[in-house]
Amino acid sequence: MTAIHPSAVIDADVELGQDVEIGPFCVIGPGVRIGARTRIASHVVIEGPSEVGADCVIHSGAVLGGAPQHAAYANERTSLRVGDRSIVREHVTLHRGTAQGRGVTQIGADAYLMAGAHVGHDCVLGDHVTMANGAVLGGHVQVGDFVIVGGLAAVHQRARIGRHAFVGGMAGINHDLIPYGSAWGNHAHLEGLNLVGLKRRGLPRERINALRAGFKCLFWSDGPFEQRVEATAAGHAGSPEVMEIIEFIRGPSARPITMPRGEPREV
């Protein structure tokens, strides 16, 4: 049964799924769709056009679908989409897209966005993305599935973060981060592989070992990086994880790749 607190301000154009709960002093504007069984706490603002999936939980003070922080924005009709089962904690801000970009900001399913996190205009987040307290994404950032962004980390606009990567707390990411990579520092460098996350998700040991071997070939062998990319692709073609990194590096991007620094480390 849908339950709306009498102090909430809900536009007549809002579409609510079954059994939605909306707490006190919320403001939900025109062009908003909210999926079934989603629970919205007090003092939440959702501006449209925005779509929030089913079984989400949105905590107090969050602002979803706000206008993009873009100097050229001129009230074009752009949107925000939040996937099913996502958790949006206190004071998170999720902005709509821009006409200059994709026109939509996309949050995948099962996101966990902790207090004070920010997702800028035109970002695309995959499924099961976690952003810790105060982590921020600039505009047009692409984040793959199962990525974790540590507390107070900042990702520069148009950067890409590959699947299963880990960004350390307070890191500054201004280059692309490979799938399965673990980046630390300000500005961030490639520390190694996100082995903890891969083990938690049950990647078999033999595939982890193959990934480690490919990583060492790519980042710690001799020769120009372009040659190492080709050598790694030829020598480790049997590892889907290594080939995912290779395709990520070869893919179109506005940013360089986050690289290691210093002496080789165990990965």
Image (cartoon, rainbow, N blue to C red):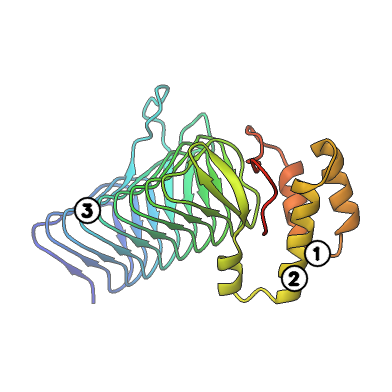
In contact (CB < 8 Å): disc 2 and disc 1: yes
**Closer-to-camera residue (130/123):** 130
- Residue on which the image places disc 1: 239
On the image, the x and y values in percent for residue 15 come to 32, 59
Q: CA distance from mark 2 to mark 3?
A: 44 Å
Can the viewer see residue 162? no
Indicate the amino acid at tag 2. Answer: Arg
Q: Residues within 10 Å of mark 1 (few under 14, many from 20)?
A: some
- Residue on which the image places disc 3: 44
**Closer-to-camera residue (93/180):** 180
On the image, the x and y values in percent for residue 267 come to 67, 59
Q: CA distance from mark 2 to mark 1?
A: 7 Å
On the image, the x and y values in percent for residue 173 come to 52, 40
In this view, which residue lies farthest toward the left? 7
Please identify the quarter of the rendering in which residue 102 is found. Answer: top right
Residue appearing at x 63%, y 54% in the figure: 192
Indicate the amino acid at tag 1. Answer: Ser
On the image, the x and y values in percent for residue 217 come to 81, 52
Please identify the quarter of the rendering in which residue 199 is found. Answer: bottom right
| Residue 3 falls left or right of residue 111 | left
Q: Is residue 216 above or below residue 128?
A: above
**Closer-to-camera residue (206/24):** 206
Residue appearing at x 42%, y 22% in the figure: 72
**Mark with earlier residue (2, 1):** 2
| Residue 170 falls left or right of residue 249 | left
